[in-house]
Image (cartoon, helix red, strand yellow):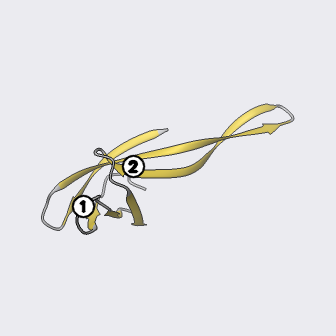
Amino acid sequence: MTISFIARDAEGREYTIIVTTESIETATKSGRSYIPGRRLLETTNGDPVNRIAKGVYEVLPALGPAVRVASDHPDAP
């Protein structure tokens, strides 16, 4: 499952964050089922994102310092 939302830094710059949730396949007596697994957060240009708290994130660009961003989007984890 993949969702995306907009987060902003202190200066108002926007970052689109993509959240991908891996599915874990499990076997039960009634068959196979899937449960949510690890979440991967990254920007649209591939920079990794750390979740600090609900709605608060740290973007880790390849070049330059980390950037704190926030979002009040209802889908933001």
Residue 58 place in picture, x, y as percent: 33, 65
The answer to whether the residues at label 1 and label 2 have Cβ atoms under 8 Å apart is no
User: Which residue does the image show at 21% across and 59% down from the upper left?
Assistant: 8
Q: Residue furthest top?
A: 31
Q: Please tell me how many numbered marks the rendered image carries.
A: 2
Describe the element under mark 1 as helix, strand or loop.
loop
Specify the quadrant of the image occupied by residue 56. Answer: bottom left
Please name whichever residue, 64 or 12, is drawn nearer the observer in this view of the structure.
64
* Residue 53 makes an appearance in the image: no
Give the labeled residue for mark 2.
Answer: 75
Residue 17 place in picture, x, y as percent: 32, 49
Quadrant in which the C terminus is drawn:
bottom left
Specify the quadrant of the image occupied by residue 4. Answer: top left
* Residue 52 makes an appearance in the image: yes
User: Which residue does the image show at 44% across and 39% down from the upper left?
Assistant: 2
For disc 1, the neighbor class at 10 Å (few under 14, some 14 to 19, many from 20) is few
Q: Is residue 69 left or right of residue 22?
A: left
User: Which residue does the image show at 25% across and 69% down from the upper left?
Assistant: 65
Q: Is residue 3 left or right of residue 9?
A: right
Describe the element under mark 2 as helix, strand or loop.
loop
Residue 38 place in picture, x, y as percent: 56, 52
- The numbered mark at residue 54 is none
User: Which residue does the image show at 28% across and 59% down from the upper left?
Assistant: 61
Residue 72 place in picture, x, y as percent: 30, 58
Q: Residue furthest right?
A: 29
Give the labeled residue for mark 1.
Answer: 63
Identify which amino acid the numbered label 2 is placed on: Asp
Q: Gap between marks 1 and 2, in whole Å?
A: 28 Å
Identify which amino acid the numbered label 1 is placed on: Leu
Q: Is residue 28 left or right of residue 36?
A: right
